[in-house]
Amino acid sequence: MTALSGMTGFGRADGAGDGWTWSVEARSVNGRNLEVRFRGPHGFDAVERAAKAAGQARFARGQVSIGLQVKRTDAGEASVAVNAAVLARYLTLANELAEDGATPPSADGLLALRGVIETPEEVDDPEARSALEAAMAHTAEQALDALKASRQQEGALLAPVLEDFIARIETLTAQAESEAAAQVETIRERFTRRITELAPDAPGLDERIFLEAAALAAKADVREELDRLTAHVAAARQLVASAPAGRKLDFLMQEFMREANTLCSKSATTALTGIGLELKAVIEQLREQVQNVE
């Protein structure tokens, strides 16, 4: 059995080597589909590709953000330079925006833009460069593993909540089944009373009452809806015990609500209508929790 997983979490890992230190933070929030984003200093495209691939391999849903921070430790060799051409382009764009009413840019804001500050991030030796990128990618995998563990912890907390809602739906379905059994007699008595009040001496009245009551009872028959609700409960329990199950649970919530709506529309008694309305409320609460499931 695969543990249920949520979509919210955080993971971090650090690394060092060959005159560099780096840290990777991975975090995620709810999302209908999987979206993996990477943010890091210029020049580490290979690490970005590896980190995104690792995220896509570990998760099925959610918005996953991976951030890489890099620092050179051999300060004696490090230097900082401003890319004048890139800065000029940013300044031109900023001035155009300022003419339209935007806030003028600050110096620290401009220097923080990607590509303005250049550091000696290039490693001349291809083998050393490849080894450095592989080490950073490994750190990214560690951060993603920590994120996955965090999401699984959320899933462990979600599972009993979902199971409780499913159990409540099962109980309400049983109550609806018991109440629905009395609908036929209720319809017959109600129809008989109204017809006899309108035409007490009409010939063949008993036969017509029986036929009309039978037709009304057939329209109010909710056995199919109750059978499907019972089947949906069993399916929901199976999905909660597996992962990833979020998309399937999303679809199942629609099916739950469709049967509950039909149950209410077919109801011929106040009691059954009340059960149907409560059933819809519980299904909606379950649907909200399902939005957190991967």
Image (spheres, grey):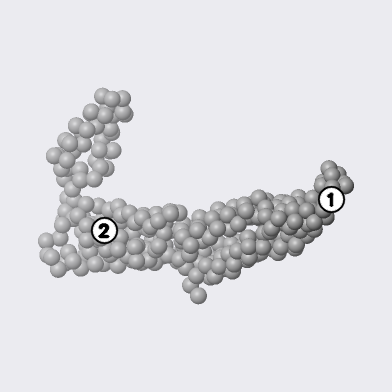
Give whichever of 48, 168 is nearer the camera. 168
Judge from the rendering whether residue 111 lies leftward or rightward of residue 10; answer left or right: left
The furthest residue to the right:
201
**Which is more toward the observer, 172 or 30?**
172
Res 50 quadrant in image: bottom left
Residue at 83% of width from left, 43% of height from top? 198
Instruction: Count residues near mark 2 (Cα–Cα under 10 Å), then give few for <14, some for 14-19, many for 20+.
Output: many
- Indicate which label's residue lies in the foreground, 1 or 2: 1
**Residue 14 shows up from this direction:** no
Q: Are marks 1 and 2 in contact (CB under 8 Å)?
A: no
Vertical order, 173 against 84 (above or below):
below
Kind of residue at disc 1: Pro
Q: Position of residue 157 (x, y in %)?
A: 56, 63
Q: Which residue is mark 1?
A: 203
- What count of labels does the image hold? 2
Tell me if 148 is positioned left or right of 280 in this view: left
Q: Give me the C-alpha separation between circle 1 and circle 2.
A: 86 Å
Q: Residue 52 appears in which quarter of the rendering?
A: bottom left
Q: Is residue 150 above or below residue 30?
A: below
Element type where label 2 sits in the image: helix
Three-letter code, disc 2: Glu
Q: Which residue is mark 2?
A: 48
Q: Residue at x 76, y 50 (%)?
A: 270
Q: Residue furthest front?
A: 203
